[in-house]
Image (spheres, rainbow, N blue to C red):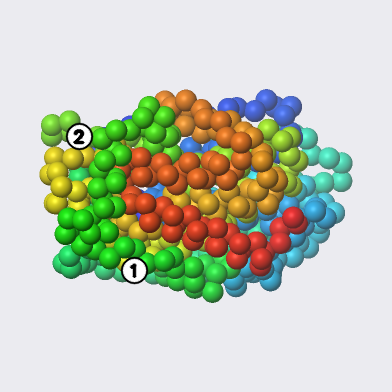
Amino acid sequence: MKLSINRWLLPVLLLVGGAARTQTPKKNDVNGTALLHRAHQALTDVMVHDIFSPPVASRVYAYTHMAAYECLAHFSPSLKNLQGQVMDYPRIQFPDTARIDPVIAALYAFQLTGKQLIFSEKVFTDSLDHLKTIAGSGLKKGKSLSASLAAGKLVADSILAWSGRDHYKETRKMRRYSYKKDPGAWLPTPPGYMAAVEPNWRMIRPLTMDSASQFRPAPATVFSKEKGSAFYQLAEEVYTISKQLTKEQREIALFWDCNPFFLNTQGHLNYATKKISPGGHWMQIAGLVSRMKGADLFTTSKAYTATAMVIFEGFISCWEEKYHSQLIRPETYINAYMDESWRPLLQTPPFPEHSSGHSVVSAAASVVLTKVFGDQVAFTDDTEVPFGLPSRQFRSFEEASKEAAISRLYGGIHYRPAIDNGYKEGVEVAGWMLGRVNLGW
């Protein structure tokens, strides 16, 4: 049975923010690396269209790329399969590797896994069918299309069965989030006052962590509405910075906004502008640096898979803390105790404040990508170009991750401790995963 994925649902007119970047490969383009990039972009385009919350998007990326990676790991001495390295991971053995084309098997596993985790199945299937046809046109002598597809299906079936035991389905049936009435507790924010997103994500089975709370960050600053208190000063910093943003700070905040569902309000009309998720942004970075480096198919798959895995882990850790501390957002606090008409530059997302999801997953992804490609890798990030924003240049993954983290202060949606503590949390999550998973570093 197809899994039901949680979306942010409102009676709105949906507009896609930016054109899709998937290009149609030429028929003679049977390069496996290029086809994997195309497959990833097709998945991303569909997820932007289908509006997945950041945690759910991370789950889709992780399982789909792990399926493709598992196929490829059987055919490369440079890759290590995930058996015995990931929680409850299935043991998968191909019956006849000699006749299997790894590219076709990987694309088919990617397709079968991905389509069960999204809504727009037909669009995604049509894209991947086209890619499989291109891959099949270059089938080498001695390789069997049917054997390759059977191998891909074997992996996809195994990954989907395994993913079905991660408690995701159970969280779909749980009661809606009950708001606390305690002083300093999180409440929904304007303009949509949307319901809490994934309050039970802590229940999702981690890939390598012992528990969702293993890397719970330092506690948030104790709430106080008293002027001059430590908490008041944190809110005052957000408020003051928002009033004197430089051009550069504004551009940074907008570049890293990555709000999958930005609600526009015009009178009685509400409509959404859809963009890539924060995890999706880092998955794009993994892909663009792979292309920039001329990485082969196996290294490219390793980069995508390792990044997807650590982002998935990062969201589990971060969301556990969010609904543990349930801290009030700057917008709510400032409106109540400083300036009732104030609005942040960015739209406050519908979940508690501490810790910062951008900080956690950006730090985690940067650590993993540094492991794959090395330190001081300069790159131009054009992820947001399809959404109307210019590209930005970075000297390293770490520099990009720190900019992504501080962007949340500039955007007016996080206090500084959520950023600092979240960044440390992400580094710890990544370090733990790298100490337990070897993809062939």
Name above or below for residue 14 compared with residue 121: above
- The residue shown at (50%, 59%) is 424
Q: Position of residue 3 (x, y in %)?
A: 43, 59
Of 125 and 303, nearer the camera is: 303
Q: Residues within 10 Å of mark 2 (few under 14, many from 20)?
A: few
- The residue shown at (60%, 27%) is 24
Q: Position of residue 310 (x, y in %)?
A: 56, 57
Mark 2 lies on residue = 265
Q: CA distance from mark 1 to mark 2?
A: 31 Å
Please say if the residues under marks 1 and 2 sit with CB atoms less than 8 Å apart.
no
Q: Position of residue 321 (x, y in %)?
A: 38, 65
- The residue shown at (49%, 68%) is 215
- Could you tell me the amino acid type at mark 1? His
Name above or below for residue 356 compared with residue 176: above
Asked if residue 121 lies left or right of residue 254, the reply is right
Q: Position of residue 17 (x, y in %)?
A: 38, 31
Mark 1 lies on residue = 324
- Checking the image for residue 132, the label placed there is none
Mark 1 element type: helix
Closer to the N terminus: mark 1 or mark 2? 2
Residue 215 in view here: yes
Q: Nearer the viewer, mark 1 or mark 2?
A: 1
Mark 2 element type: strand
Asked if residue 330 lies left or right of residue 161, the reply is left
